[in-house]
Image (tube, rainbow, N blue to C red):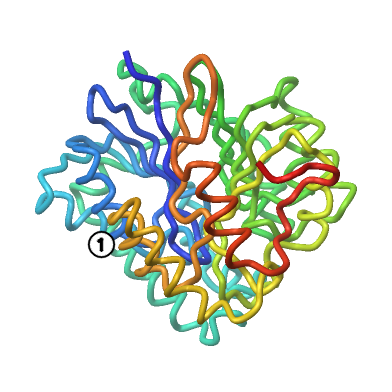
Amino acid sequence: MSPLRIAFLDVGQGDTTVIYDPDSKEAVIVDCANSVSALQFLKSEGITRLRALVLTHPHLDHYAAAVTLFENCGAHNIVWDAWIMRWDKAFGRIPSILVDADRHPAMLGDDRVQKSALTKLYAWSRQSENKKKHIEPHQLAKVQRITQSLDFLHPLHPDVQELFETGNLNNLSYVIKVSDGESALLAGDIEPAGWEFLRANHQNLQSEILKFPHHGGAWDGQSVANLLDEVKPQFVIISVGTRNAYNHPSDAVFTEIRQHPKTRLLCTEATPKCGQDLDIQTKEILSLVKKRNKLGALISQRARGCPCAGTIIVELGDEAKVIDPDILFHQHQIIRSHLTTPQCIPLGTAWL
């Protein structure tokens, strides 16, 4: 039996994560910023059943393409079963979402973009057949291997109102632990305040793979250190866009991860912190990626950023490992050859 795999798709500044079983051809998707990339990836892996789409929280870079994904599953011969999201409060308070502490509308340039997308999703969710497929995490059938692997750690129901009242929807993000031998912690956009709720409710958060929360932003040095000490990851994944107005990932995140020489950091895309003339480098890097993985190059091209690790695929099982990109290819042909100021080299660690 093959171990479960997790793919962190290169969707620019946003999240689309595919958890899939190579044997049963089933998947669960966590967030969907780009439906075309998600569907192309599912097709490439022969996935025929989408057991659930989990939308961690109502910010555009996590749900923008959810409706389009569902509307096009049939055309790709994919059956979908359910979707999961805490919409009960979010839909009732659209104005507060548009002015939350993360300043998403200001960064998007026009709050009508977010309001339109949220309204579209709300209208879709009210259709009878879709309403029936909207479930809570505890209703997810635990009879398939893919769904048995999921543990929704955060938020706990008694904490939801208090978290919502902080005015920051990031701290309401679903945090999911995926276990199949080794484990991966998918942390959504949770920030330090939300992390404290998570820590208080769960004794063991150790995971070999950490999808770093909030695209590597909104965490100070001590908070990052505490997070890494608690999770003890071998691999840290950051889904980030080359062009983002948030200055993600933060310097504190890079600095603290460099203090952990046994932790390998992979970002889906490079940012100006890692190299100059990224517009020029993008074409050359995409050409390299295409020689190794045409689908990966196609997904990265759609993201319109400069891929670094690009789409990242990890495998759980007895020993968690990154199966794409290959470490030598990533470090030498991408980082060392094209990025002048890479931020992911642990202190005191030589290149392979």
The one nearer the camera, 7 or 294, is 294
The one nearer the camera, 177 or 124, is 177
The one nearer the camera, 130 or 3, is 3
278 to 300, vertically: above or below: below
Residue 219 horizontal/vertical position (percent): 78, 55
2 to 212, vertically: above or below: above
- What residue sits 59% from the left and 46% below the top? 237
The one nearer the camera, 183 or 292, is 292
Confirm whether residue 167 shows in the render: no
Residue 293 horizontal/vertical position (percent): 32, 52
272 to 174, vertically: above or below: below
Type of residue at label 1? Answer: Thr
Residue 290 horizontal/vertical position (percent): 33, 59
- What residue sits 42% from the left and 52% below the top? 9
- What residue sits 23% from the left and 30% below the top? 25
Residue 254 horizontal/vertical position (percent): 77, 55
**Which picture quadrant has residue 253?**
bottom right
Of the 4 image quadrants, the one containing the C terminus is top right
**Which picture quadrant has residue 1?**
top left
- What residue sits 56% from the left and 39% below the top? 186
Residue ID for mark 1? 68
User: Is 136 left, or right, of 161 in this rendering?
Assistant: left
Confirm whether residue 285 shows in the render: yes
Q: Residues within 10 Å of mark 1 (few under 14, many from 20)?
A: some
* Residue most extreme to the bottom: 109
User: Is 294 left, or right, of 218 in this rendering?
Assistant: left
Judging from the image, what secondary structure is the residue with disc 1 in? helix
